[in-house]
């Protein structure tokens, strides 16, 4: 009799499952928030749960395990598993409280199932081989992993974009040490510029650019007039950088003092020991048009709203701090008499023929 | 009548559309949603979980799921794939450093079976920034033309969530495309 009832129910279930499987591909249209749909779902769930409870009653009536008992237990198990699947399939539109309530009901049933299994399981020394197989393979792996959206599978790791690489053919200063590098005002501003692998250099970029790529600088001081696009800073150590742009991203850098102007939040990742201060103001008179050239507004500066993607807590990230006002300093050549004239002089003095295009 | 049929009928009645917004961090997903909804965009901080916005648009009810895009959050995107009618992929057109990253993530998404039927709208965002790539350049960089060989319905739209330009055109397309698929028996 049990077998017949099971057979009927199985047929019904497989019909339902087939429909659900089909639905996964063809029916995009699941209700996402309607209370009617949820009520509908709940009543469906209740029917299935009742079926499982009936099986439970049958199991409880069994006093001594016979040949039929393992099948009955497995059937119960299958019912519970399907309940799990039903709930997880509907997880997207069920309110959390409802979902938890339903999952709770399934979990308590599963506990009862385990109890009954223990009660009806023959003692180990009398255990049949197929019994133990049934017991282990089917009782493990309940479907609750599907319900709690916690553990994502190990998706194929994507290449890490930690090191920003300037586009090929980008102008720039590369591979210098101990020099003063100046890109004077008036040079072509409608392209990107790169600073790469510099050690102990003083850099002045007095022409704006579309984007600035800064990589692998050590003990350098860089002043750049604001740029209209993005600035990427990566793998820098012990530097002082004066930068302005629409958006700034810093990766994998340590002990860098940033004096920045940015109209969106600066983003840092894998950085330590950073300090932040506002971009120097006012700029020397010779650079008065610098903000306008980059289409930026001096008053819209979000330098202190740093987002550290390695630090999701509300508390201040240990990876960066605001530089105390007393310690803030504009670039040394700003304050020297003559400002820009001195800069021009320095360009003469070094007289290293740094043809930007040749670098 | 199966449960899914009931749900589908219900949904048809309400003309409800579920849109999933994804993209790399700092692409401007939240800003796109807020600007489109006419909200303030001055104080947006990185999305650490997700935001859901329900709004009425041209007779449709849009459920917009805006999910955080940081590297650490991307593995959770899959939890939001279910029942997605339209995928809106937001690209920071000024962030040329991470276009390859962006392409790889998008390709991985498009292989997902659960997103197989979803219309794809690519927003080439931040067009207001100097040096931003154009929609044509983004289309080439992301290899979108390869999608034409598949059954995917897709479109790229240049926009600026900052100024609002292009947003309505993109959303119009995605809603119409979904509507013609799902609600055509109306």
Image (cartoon, coloured by chain):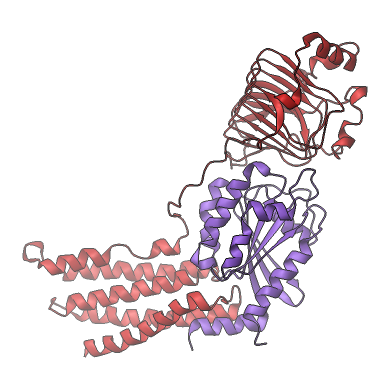
Q: Quadrant of residue A190?
A: top right
Question: Measuring 26% from the left and 67% from the top, which residue is drawn there?
Answer: A138
Q: Residue furthest top?
A: A349
Q: Quadrant of residue A79?
A: bottom left
Q: Quadrant of residue A64?
A: bottom left
Image height check: is B64 above or below A355? below
* Percent of width and height locating residue A202: 73, 17
* Percent of width and height locating residue A30: 56, 76
- Residue in the foreground of this view, choosing between A65 and A90: A90
* Percent of width and height locating residue A128: 9, 68
For the N terminus of chain A, give its image quadrant: bottom left
Question: Measuring 41% from the left and 83% from the top, which residue is drawn there?
Answer: A16
Chain B on-screen colour: purple
Question: The chain drawn red is chain what?
Answer: A
Q: Is residue A3 left or right of residue B59?
A: left
Image height check: is A247 above or below A278? below
Q: Residue furthest front?
A: A358
Question: Measuring 18% from the left and 79% from the top, which residue is drawn there?
Answer: A62
Q: From this viewpoint, is residue A31 visible?
A: yes
């Amino acid at each position: 009799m049990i077998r017949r009832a099971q057979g009927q129910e199985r047929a019904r279930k497989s019909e339902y499952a087939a429909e659900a499987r089909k639905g996964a591909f063809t029916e995009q249209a699941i209700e996402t928030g309607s209370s009617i749909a949820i009520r509908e779902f709940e009543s469906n769930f209740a029917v299935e749960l009742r079926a499982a409870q009936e099986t439970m009653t049958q199991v409880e009536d069994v006093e001594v395990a016979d040949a039929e008992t393992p099948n009955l237990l497995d059937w119960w198990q299958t019912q519970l598993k399907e309940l799990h699947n039903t709930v997880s399939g509907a997880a997207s539109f069920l309110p959390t409280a409802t979902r938890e309530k339903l999952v709770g009901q399934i979990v308590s049933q599963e506990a009862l199932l385990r109890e009954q299994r223990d009660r009806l399981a023959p003692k180990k020394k009398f255990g049949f081989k197929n019994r133990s197989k049934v017991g282990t393979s089917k009782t493990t792996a309940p479907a609750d992993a599907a319900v709690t959206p916690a553990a994502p599978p190990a998706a194929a790791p994507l290449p890490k974009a930690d090191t920003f690489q300037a586009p090929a053919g980008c102008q720039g200063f590369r591979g210098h040490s101990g020099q003063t590098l100046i890109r004077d005002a008036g040079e072509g501003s409608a392209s990107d510029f790169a600073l790469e692998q510099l050690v102990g250099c003083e850099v002045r970029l007095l022409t704006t650019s579309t984007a600035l790529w800064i990589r692998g600088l050590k003990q350098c001081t860089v002043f750049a007039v604001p740029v209209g696009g993005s600035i990427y800073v990566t793998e820098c150590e012990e530097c002082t950088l004066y930068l302005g742009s629409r958006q700034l991203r810093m990766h994998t850098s340590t002990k860098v003092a940033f004096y920045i102007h940015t109209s969106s939040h600066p983003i840092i990742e894998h950085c330590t020991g950073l300090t932040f201060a506002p971009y120097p103001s006012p700029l020397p008179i010779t650079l008065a048009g610098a903000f306008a050239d980059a289409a930026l507004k001096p008053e819209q500066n979000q330098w202190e709203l740093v987002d550290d993607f390695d630090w999701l807590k509300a508390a201040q990230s240990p990876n960066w701090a605001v530089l105390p006002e007393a310690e803030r300093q504009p670039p040394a050549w700003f304050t020297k008499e003559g400002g820009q004239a001195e800069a021009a002089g320095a360009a003469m003095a070094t007289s290293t023929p740094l043809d930007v295009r040749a670098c | 009548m199966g449960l899914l049929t009931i749900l589908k009928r219900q949904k048809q009645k309400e003309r409800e559309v579920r849109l999933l917004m994804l993209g790399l961090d700092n692409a401007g997903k939240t800003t796109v949603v807020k600007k489109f909804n006419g909200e303030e965009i001055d104080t947006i901080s990185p999305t650490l979980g997700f935001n859901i916005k329900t709004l009425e648009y041209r007779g449709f009810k849009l459920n917009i799921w805006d999910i955080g895009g940081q590297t650490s959050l991307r593995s959770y995107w899959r939890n939001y794939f279910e029942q997605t009618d339209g995928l809106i992929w937001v690209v920071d057109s000024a962030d040329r450093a991470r276009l390859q990253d962006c392409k790889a993530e998008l390709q991985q998404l498009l292989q997902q079976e659960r997103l197989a039927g979803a219309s794809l709208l690519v927003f080439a965002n931040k067009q207001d920034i100097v040096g931003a790539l154009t929609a044509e350049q983004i289309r080439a960089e992301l290899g979108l033309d390869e999608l034409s060989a598949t059954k995917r319905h897709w479109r790229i739209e240049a926009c600026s969530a900052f100024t609002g330009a292009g947003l309505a055109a993109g959303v119009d397309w995605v809603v119409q495309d979904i509507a013609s698929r799902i609600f055509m028996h109306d």
